[in-house]
């Protein structure tokens, strides 16, 4: 018996939950507003059972990472949210767009954290632009500090490209 992919298992569990609650669904409908919290709980239970029964594909070290019931439930909650956003059969046929791409830049930097807090507090005030600019500058600085330095041997390059090496 072949294992279902996590995507297919999630899709099938959501469709099953909708059908068992007599909610009409066609692939391509947006299920975000159709699923109730109790239906999501049912879907999560079905996925947890699938992982425990080894009917859903997962990596070799999956159960060592998510073997506890609590961790597996958290993982399955994220799996449901992920595929509701990304699977066009569940999200109203929309192509998934990454929102806040790169938001983690400067994540571990104390100054960036405090500037983000300050930005929330100053939202809608005259100081908002100044704080946003300071935050932008600090993130750029943190990125520059973390970017790897590359050593290029100019002698190994063709003559016409050597001027590009500083």
Image (spheres, rainbow, N blue to C red):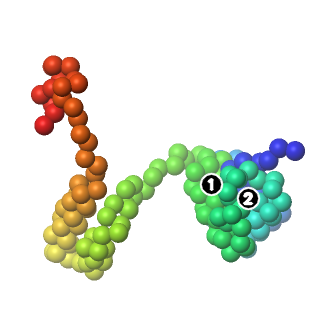
Any part of residue 39 in sight: no
Query: Which residue, as the protein is rendered here, is positioned at the far top?
Result: 159
On the image, the x and y values in percent for residue 27 come to 70, 47
Disc assigned to residue 83: 1
On the image, the x and y values in percent for residue 55 come to 81, 53
In front here: 160 or 54? Answer: 160
Element carrying mark 1: helix
Tell me the residue at 68%/58% (across/down). 62
Tell me the residue at 20%/19% (across/down). 158
Q: Quadrant of residue 39?
A: bottom right
Tell me the residue at 26%/42% (across/down). 150
Alpha carbon separation for disc pair 2 and 1: 10 Å
Left or right: residue 165 versus residue 55 is: left
Quarter of the image for the C terminus: give it.
top left
Any part of residue 85 in sight: yes
Which is closer to the viewer, label 2 or label 1?
1
Tell me the residue at 29%/74% (across/down). 110
| N-term mark: 2 or 1 | 2
On the image, the x and y values in percent for residue 78 come to 61, 64
Element carrying mark 2: helix
């Amino acid at each position: 018996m072949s294992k279902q992919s996590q995507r297919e298992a999630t899709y099938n569990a959501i469709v099953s939950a909708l059908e068992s609650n007599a909610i009409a669904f066609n692939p391509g409908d947006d299920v975000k507003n159709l699923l109730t919290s109790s239906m999501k709980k049912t879907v999560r239970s079905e996925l947890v059972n699938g992982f425990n029964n080894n009917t859903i594909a997962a990596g070799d070290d999956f159960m060592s990472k998510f073997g506890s019931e609590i961790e597996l439930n958290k993982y399955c909650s994220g799996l449901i949210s992920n595929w509701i956003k990304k699977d066009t059969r569940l999200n109203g046929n929309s192509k998934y767009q990454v929102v806040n791409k790169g938001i983690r830049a400067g994540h571990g930097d104390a100054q960036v954290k405090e500037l983000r807090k300050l930005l929330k507090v100053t939202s809608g005030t005259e100081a908002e632009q100044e704080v946003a600019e300071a935050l932008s500058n600090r993130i750029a600085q943190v990125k520059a500090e973390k970017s790897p330095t590359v050593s290029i041997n100019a002698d190994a390059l063709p003559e016409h490209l050597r001027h590009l090496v500083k």
